[in-house]
Every structure is written in structure tokens, then in C-alpha cells.
């Protein structure tokens, strides 16, 4: 008997009727002769409502208690999904992340999986049950509830697929698969039949909301091939797999955008060894997650250091960097918001020249100014005015012929 792991996101289980739809899909898979493990997210809107309730009770709720609170969202869904499947005359059982054997480190709200021993889950499968597992959560060795960060249900599904050696892992969502860009931003975007782990990882980390980047990292590490597809139809999705030679023929696979970016600049930093280390040690100590870093050429013994981050991280910046800026003798700390990140991604960029130039030319023709640039083997990303993101995505998408 083959074994399938299916993951359903918040919109797929957003109300009782959609949960019943998921139940019918799962039962159909079992009736085809598969053992089925189902990972579900909280119903759409539930996590945001729980966060709002927490903020109403406390301006700065403890992360430990936030994990206890947020984990209840998925637990509601697993119970309801199991009930819906049982109502169809099948045997289903709900399991929390801990009961499924997911052990994490102790970092609350963004824990990492440190061990996975799905002994209880395997026993239920052997007994003929469909196992419904709460995504997004786990438990430390000392029995503290933890959560895996936004999109953590993807990670739960990929990790379980690796642990139980599943024959197939399907990530069901509200879109038909992975597109060359968000179709809501670029109407001519088309669905991809396949994409490499590296490309998917870059797209996820560059703003694509289809998959959590850590889950793609895990899939690449353990070789878990998975399919991203819609829970609302039977259309084939996008297969995410190891890179193949045919993938290199496509220079640019897709375009990603990320809103809510901010730029922090430390002005007139003394240009001497160890100063940049002081700045970024303070950034790390404040748990500020940064993206691009640019240091200007030294002039008159000083230089400017700029970096980008999500604007949600800005409250930590003044506290984390204010004191250090004074200690190193820098002139000022400047913070600017209202930026967005636009990225092009493709493994074919490794073997083709002029890709960045073509992107910059397209943006220039569209009257879009570039603030910062970052490159890697398979990605070129720019920071631009957030108000120009949609225009930028469309002109770049068209320049590389990615449309339908």
C-alpha cells in the first residue's frame, strides 16, 4: 500500500463546507488504496483573531503563552476534519504535533524541528485510520508547546513525509500551483509544470506566499518531491523536485515581489576593521532579520552601511542599534519605509549572461528607479518604491517572455 501525505491550508478548511470537501478528497484517496496522513492549518482568519485577542489582553504577550494560544487554531481544525471523515463512515483520528512525534528546539514562535519519531502515527495507520495532524506546532523535550512560524504547516507536512517515507506529498492550497508571478499582480502569469528546489526556495524567500521557505529547505535536504495544487479542483499542480538539465534551458523561471520593506542606513561609519562587525553583532543580538546589505565606498575615512528588512522589524532597530551607533562614532541612524523587493529567479541564470542588464533596462523603460541591488547565482533582486512594485513586476515579467 502506498502512503500519501496531504496538507490543506487555511482557506481550504476555512468553513465547515470546505472541511467537508477536504474530507471527501481524503476519503477518495484512501478508497484508491492509499494510506493517508493529513496535515491541516488553522481555519483562515483564526490565527489573526487569536493574535488580536492576545494584543487586547497584553501589549507584549510572552512568546511561550503565544505558542500555547496559537496552537489551538490547528487543534480545532484537526478535530473538525476527523469528525467530517468519520461522518462519511471512515475511521479518522486527530493528533497534535506532539502526538505525531514532532520534537522542536525551545525557540518560541519560530521553533525548528530537532527530531521526529512518528511511532504513534504509524500505529494508527497500521490500524486503518486516516491520521489528521495539526500543522505548525510541536513540543520541546521538556513538554513545552512550540510553533514553527508562519506557514509552518508546510514544514510539518514535508517533515512527516520524510519521516514516514511517503510515496507522495501534496500541498493543497487555494491556487492551482506555482505561477511565474502572483496572478493577482501579473494577470498574464502562467502556471509552471515543474520547478527545482532551489528556484522554489528563492521564490519563497523573495516574497512568494505559496510555500514557507524552511519547508522547501527541508524538502531539498531530505529529497522530498512534492506537488503544489488546488484543493478546489482536480487540475494537476506544480511538481517541486531536484534540478534537471532541461530546467537550465529556461533562463528566468519566475518573478517574486515582497511588500513592506524598509531601509536602515548607518551614516558616516568610521572605515576601520571591526566596525561593521559591531553593527551587525548588535543587529543579531536584537533578533533583527535582515535581507540586503550594501556598504558604500569609503570617503574621507567614513562609509555608509545600509540594509533592508521587513518593516515589522523596525521597532527593534532603534533599541538594538541606537547605542552602538554612538559608540562607534557614526553620524546618524536613518530609517526609511515604503519600499518593496522585486526578484527574478531561475537556475538558467547560472549559464546565461546579461540577465541583470535586461531586468534593469526593463525597469528603466518603465520609469522605475532602483534603490538597492542584490545578486546570487540564480536570483537578482532590487529594492524599489513599493508603489511601483506592480508596474515593475509586469514590465519585468513581459521582458523575459514569461506570460501566457
Image: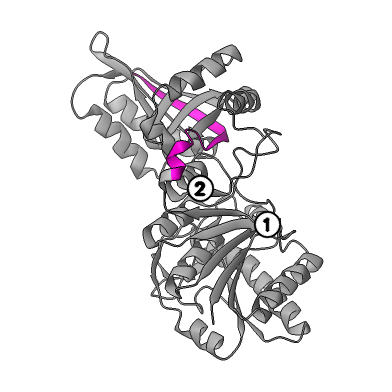
Residue 24, picture quadrant: bottom right
Q: In the displayed structure, does residue 133 sit left or right of residue 372?
A: right
Q: Quadrant of the N terminus?
A: bottom right
Residue 401, picture quadrant: top right
**Dot label at residue 195:** 2
Q: How far from the left and from the top, in percent, is residue 363?
A: 56, 18
Q: In terms of secondary structure, what is the magenta stretch mainly?
A: strand
The local secondary structure at tag 2 comes to strand
Q: Which residue is mark 1?
A: 53
Foreground residue, 69 or 212? 212
> What's the residue at 55%, 85% (across, down)?
125
Task: Please report whichever mark, 2 or 1, sits nearer to the chain's N-terminal start.
Answer: 1
Foreground residue, 312 or 198? 198
Q: How far from the left and from the top, in percent, is residue 264?
A: 44, 27
Foreground residue, 257 or 379? 379
Between label 2 and label 1, give the one nearer the viewer. Answer: 2
Magenta span has 251? yes
Near mark 1 (Cα within 10 A), the count class, few <14, some 14-19 or many ≥20, is: few
Boundaries of the magenta span = 246-268
The local secondary structure at tag 1 comes to helix
Magenta span has 352? no
* Residue occupying the far left of the picture: 273
Q: In the displayed structure, does residue 326 sit left or right of residue 228?
A: left
> What's the residue at 72%, 73% (across, down)?
23
Q: Quadrant of the C terminus?
A: top right
Marks 2/1: CA distance?
A: 39 Å
Question: On screen, 17 above or below 389?
Answer: below
Q: In the displayed structure, does residue 370 sit left or right of residue 326?
A: right
Residue 114 shows in this picture: yes
Residue 57 shows in this picture: no
Amino acid at each position: 500500500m502506498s502512503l500519501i501525505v496531504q496538507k490543506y491550508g487555511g482557506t481550504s478548511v476555512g468553513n465547515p463546507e470546505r472541511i467537508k470537501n477536504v474530507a471527501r478528497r481524503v476519503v477518495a484517496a484512501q478508497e484508491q488504496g492509499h494510506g493517508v496522513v493529513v496535515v491541516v492549518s488553522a481555519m483562515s482568519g483564526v490565527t489573526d483573531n487569536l493574535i488580536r485577542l492576545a494584543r487586547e489582553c497584553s501589549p507584549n504577550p510572552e512568546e511561550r503563552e503565544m505558542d500555547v494560544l496559537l496552537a489551538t487554531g490547528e487543534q480545532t481544525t484537526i478535530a473538525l476534519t476527523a469528525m467530517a471523515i468519520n461522518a462519511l463512515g471512515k475511521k479518522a483520528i486527530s493528533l497534535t504535533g506532539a502526538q505525531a512525534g514532532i520534537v522542536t528546539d525551545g525557540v518560541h514562535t519560530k521553533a525548528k524541528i530537532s527530531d521526529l519519531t512518528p511511532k504513534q502515527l504509524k500505529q494508527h495507520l497500521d490500524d486503518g485510520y486516516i491520521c489528521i495532524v495539526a500543522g505548525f506546532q510541536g513540543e520541546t523535550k521538556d513538554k513545552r508547546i512550540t510553533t514553527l512560524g508562519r506557514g509552518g504547516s508546510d514544514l510539518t507536512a514535508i517533515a512527516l513525509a520524510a519521516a514516514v517515507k511517503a510515496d507522495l506529498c501534496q500541498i493543497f492550497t487555494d491556487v492551482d500551483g506555482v505561477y511565474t508571478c502572483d496572478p493577482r499582480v501579473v494577470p498574464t502569469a502562467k502556471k509552471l509544470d515543474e520547478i527545482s528546489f532551489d528556484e522554489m526556495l528563492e521564490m519563497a524567500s523573495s516574497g512568494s506566499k505559496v510555500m514557507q521557505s524552511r519547508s522547501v529547505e527541508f524538502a531539498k535536504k531530505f529529497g522530498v518531491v512534492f506537488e503544489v495544487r488546488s484543493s478546489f479542483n482536480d487540475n494537476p499542480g506544480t511538481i517541486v523536485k531536484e534540478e534537471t538539465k532541461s530546467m537550465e534551458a529556461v533562463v528566468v523561471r519566475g518573478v517574486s515581489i515582497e511588500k513592506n520593506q524598509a531601509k536602515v542606513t548607518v551614516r558616516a561609519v568610521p572605515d576601520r576593521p571591526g566596525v561593521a562587525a559591531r553593527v551587525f553583532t548588535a543587529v543579531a543580538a536584537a533578533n533583527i532579520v535582515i535581507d540586503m546589505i550594501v556598504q558604500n565606498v569609503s570617503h574621507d575615512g567614513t562609509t555608509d552601511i545600509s540594509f533592508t528588512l521587513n518593516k515589522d522589524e523596525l521597532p527593534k532597530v532603534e533599541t538594538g542599534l541606537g547605542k552602538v551607533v554612538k559608540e562607534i562614532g557614526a553620524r546618524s541612524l536613518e530609517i526609511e519605509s515604503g519600499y518593496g523587493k522585486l526578484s527574478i529567479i531561475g537556475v538558467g541564470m547560472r549559464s546565461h549572461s546579461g540577465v541583470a542588464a535586461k531586468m534593469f533596462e526593463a525597469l528603466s523603460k518603465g520609469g522605475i528607479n532602483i534603490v538597492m541591488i542584490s545578486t546570487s547565482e540564480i536570483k537578482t533582486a532590487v529594492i524599489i518604491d513599493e508603489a511601483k512594485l506592480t508596474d515593475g513586476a509586469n514590465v519585468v515579467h513581459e521582458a523575459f517572455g514569461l506570460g501566457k
